[in-house]
Image (tube, rainbow, N blue to C red):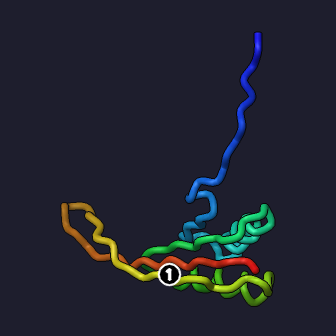
Amino acid sequence: MAEKKKTENTTKSDDNVIFVGKKPAMSYVLAVMTQFTAGAKEVQIKARGKSISRAVDVAEIVKNKFLGDVKVKNIEIGTEERTVDGGNKVNVSTLSILLAKG
């Protein structure tokens, strides 16, 4: 019986995306560093609402303290309309920071 070898192709676009939430900034810095150490050329940091300032902190810590060859390639801002309890709709700010190595 011949077994098929699985070839893992982990180049999905979501692989290099870090979603910033309520954890301490250094948790996300470690996640970004792990992606770059694993060979990623670009890592995207995304955040919404109150986590936006933490996402900026993460990008600056990675860029200035750990990896000097990382540059901010792109920054996107936007607004998402979210439905909360009771059916009310609220606007939530979004931020996406694309870091590139080299």
| For residue 18, side relative to residue 88 (left or right) | right
- Image coordinates for residue 22, horizontal then vertical, percent: 55, 71
Residue at the extreme left? 87
| For residue 8, side relative to residue 74 (left or right) | right
Residue under the point 71% across and 32% down: 6
| For residue 99, side relative to residue 53 (left or right) | right
In this rendering, the answer to whether 87 lies above or below 33 is above
| Crowd band around label 1 with a 10 angstrom C-alpha radius: few (<14), some (14–19), many (20+) | some
Residue under the point 28% across and 70% down: 81
Q: How many marks?
A: 1
Residue at the extreme top? 1
In this rendering, the answer to whether 97 lies above or below 82 is below
In this rendering, the answer to whether 7 lies above or below 12 is above
The three-letter code of the residue at mark 1 reads Ile
- Image coordinates for residue 78, horizontal then vertical, percent: 38, 79
| Viewer-proximal residue among 49 and 63 | 63
Q: Which residue is mark 1?
A: 52
> Which quadrant does the N terminus fall into?
top right
| Secondary element at tag 1 | helix
- Image coordinates for residue 80, horizontal then vertical, percent: 33, 72
| Viewer-proximal residue among 18 and 40 | 40
Residue under the point 19% across and 61% down: 86
- Image coordinates for residue 39, horizontal then vertical, percent: 77, 64
Residue 13 occupies quadrant: bottom right
> Which quadrant does the C terminus fall into?
bottom right
Residue 24 occupies quadrant: bottom right
